[in-house]
Image (cartoon, helix red, strand yellow):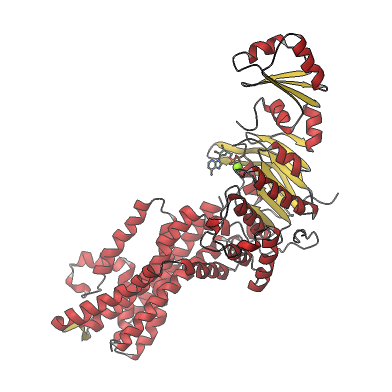
Amino acid sequence: MSAPVITANLLTKKYKEVAAVDGISFEVAPGESFGLLGPNGAGKSTTMRMVGAVSTRTSGDLSILGLDPNDHGPEVRSQLGVVPQQDNLDMELRVRDNLIVYGRYFGIPNKTAGKKADELLEFAQLSDRAKAKVDDLSGGMKRRLTIARSLMNEPRILLLDEPTTGLDPQARHILWDRLFRLKEQGTTLVLTTHYMDEAEQLCDRLVVVDKGTIMAEGAPAALIRQYSTREVVEVRFGSDRNAEVAERIRGIGERIEVLPDRILIYSENGEAELQKITEMGLEPITSLVRRSSLEDVFLRLTGRSLIE
Amino acid sequence: MTAPTTFAPTRPVQRRSTSLLGSLYAGNARSVMHRGLLATKSTNWLVVMSGFFEPIFYLLSMGIGLGALVGTVETSTGAHVPYAAFIAPALLAVAAMNGAIYDSTWNVFFKMQYAKLYEGMLSTSLGPLDVALGEISLALLRGALYAGGFLIVMQVLGLNLAWTALLALPAVLLIAFGFASLGMAITSYMKTFQQMDWINFVMLPMFLFSATFYPLTVYPEPIQWVIQVLPLWHGVELVRGLTTGALSVAMLGHVLYYVVMIAVGLVFTTKRLRALFLD
Ligand SMILES: Nc1ncnc2c1ncn2[C@@H]1O[C@H](COP(=O)(O)OP(=O)(O)O)[C@@H](O)[C@H]1O
Ligand SMILES: [Mg+2]
C-alpha cells in the first residue's frame, strides 16, 4: 500500500479546558474515501479544520501529504479542496466569478481559471447559472457550487464537512452522484456526516466518533457485521408501554435496545423473532424488519441515536 | 460527462520556506485585490461618489466663500497663503483618508462578521498577510482616486502654489496607505456596530481640529499635543508643505509617522486575521 496522505496521531484540540477533539488517530490512503461519522458536537468539524490547515492543534501529530500543517499552512492548503459545513461563497460575485476568483487565490492565472471554471460549472450542472447571483441559487445549487469551487485547484484531497446536511432528498441524490464520480476518478475524499446512509454510500472506510474520541473504525459493512446482527426488528407499542413490553420479551433475539418511541430486537432472522412476539399475544402498533445499519452500530457503541 | 481531473498522485508538493513569513504570506495579495475590484461592480456608486465630493464641497464653500472674509493665513513654516490654498491641502489629505477609511472600516467589518469572506480566502493557499495587503491596497486605491481627483480640482482652481505639489501625489498615497492599514487593523478587533460607531466618533473631531481650517497655534499647548499625536495632522502638514512649497525638515517626521502607521496596521491586521481564522 502506498504511503498515507493523511496521518493523525493522538490529534487533540482544546478550547479553553474543553477538548473538542480528544486524542484521535487515523490514516487515510491515497484514493480512499474516508468518513467521520458522529452526532452533532462530536468534534468532526474541528477535526476537519485541523486537517484543512485552518486550525492549530493543541497536541498530537498531524501530517498532510508529508507536511505538518502548523509549519506549512499555505502549501498544505494549496493541495486541498475544502467544502466547509457552512457555505462561505462570495455573495458579492456572480457564480462563475466565484470560481475564477477562488482559483486566483491559489495563484492560477486568469485564463486557466476561466477554462477550469467552465469545466467545473458543467460538472456541477450549473452552466446555465454562470452569470446568476449566488443569492438566487437554491441550497443544493450553492452546495454544488461550493464543491465546484473546492476543485478549482485540482486538489489531491477533498475535505467535505457534512456535504448534504440541510438539503432535500432530491438535492442530496444529485450531490451524491457528483461525489461518486469524483470517487471513481480516484480523488481522495474525507467527509463527515451524521447520516448513516451517506456514510454507507460514500465511504470505503470510516471512524465512528463521539465526544471527540474514536469509538470504532472499519468499512461500513465490516462495522455492521462486528457490532450488530444481520437484521433488526423494530416494534412500537406506544411510548407508555414500550419499557414494560421490553421486559416481557427479554431473551428474544440476540440483544434488545429500548428507545423512547420503539424497541429494537437484533437478530440474524428478524421475521422469526417478530413471529415469536406475536405468538406471545403481543400486538405491536407497527412492526418492521430491516437490515442493520450504521445507526445500529452507533447505538450499540454509545447507547444513543445519531440524530437526536 | 466525466468528472474533472483532480487526483494527481505524482505531482510533487512544493516546499517553500518554513519561516514564519512562509505561513503568513504566499505572495499573492494581487488576487485579493482583483477580487475586490470585481466586487466593486456591485457597490453603491452614490455612496462612493458622495465620499469623493464631500471635501470638494468643503473647499468650495469654506475656501472660496469664507476665504473672501479671511484673506491670508500663516502656515506652520511662517509662509502667508490665501485661505483657500491653506485649507485645500488639508482637504486633500482628508480626501485620501476618507477613501481609505471607507473601504477599510465598514466594508471590512461586514466581510469579517457576516460575509465569511476571509474564512473562505484563508482556506486557500493565501496567508493572512496576503489578505491584509490585498484589502488594504484596495482601500488605498480608493483613497488615491479620491485624492487624485481632488488634486486636479486644486490645479484647476490655482491652489497648487509650487511645483512640489506634484509630490503631493505620492504623499497622499502614503496617507491613504496609513489610514487603510490602521483602519483595517482597528476594524478587525471590532465586534459590534456600536464599537464601529466609535470610529466615526473619533473621525469627525479629528477632521475638524487637525489644523484643517486654521493653524494649530490657535489652541492651548496641551490640545496641540493631542492633535499632534493623531494621524491626520501629520498628513495635513505634509501635504500643505508640498502644495504651498513651504518645505521643512519636519516633513520627514510626518513621512516616518505614516511608515510606522502602515507597519503597525499590517502587523495587527495579520495577527488578528490569523487569530480569527487560523486559530
Ligand atoms: N471555536 C470554538 N470555541 C469553543 N468551542 C468550540 C469551538 N468550535 C467547536 N467547539 C466545541 O467543540 C465541540 C465539537 O464541535 P464540532 O467540531 O463543531 O462538532 P461537530 O462538527 O461534530 O458537530 C462542540 O462541543 C463545540 O461546542
Ligand atoms: Mg460540524
Looking at the picture, how far across and down is residue A243, in whole percent?
64, 14
Q: Residue A262 sits in which quadrant?
A: top right
A212 is higher (above) or lower (below) than B163: above
- Residue B27 position, x and y percent, is 59, 69
Say which residue appears at 75% left-offset and 39% top-offset: A200
Is B234 displayed left or right of A42 in the figure? left
Q: Which residue sits furthest bottom?
A: B163
How far across and how far down the image is residue A296, in percent?
Answer: 72, 28
Give the x, y percent position of residue B234.
32, 73
Q: Nearer the viewer, residue B132 or B221?
A: B132
Residue B22 visible in this rendered orientation of the protein: no
Question: Total of numbered circles in the picture?
Answer: 0
- Residue pictured at 41% horizontal, 76% vertical: B144
Identity of the residue drawn at 28% across and 66% down:
B206
Which image quadrant for residue A80?
A: bottom right
> Which residue is at 77% across, 63% downward?
B12
In terms of image quarters, where does ligand 2 lie?
top right
The answer to whether residue A45 is above or below residue B1 is: above
Quarter holding residue A82: bottom right
Quadrant showing the N terminus of chain B: bottom right
Q: Residue furthest right?
A: A1
Residue A37 left/right relative to B108: right
Is B25 in front, or is A107? Answer: A107
Inspect this view and state whether residue B8 appears.
yes
Residue ranking furthest to the left: B69
Q: Compared with residue B58, is residue A246 higher up or lower down, i.e. above or below?
A: above
Camera-side residue: B144 or B173? B144
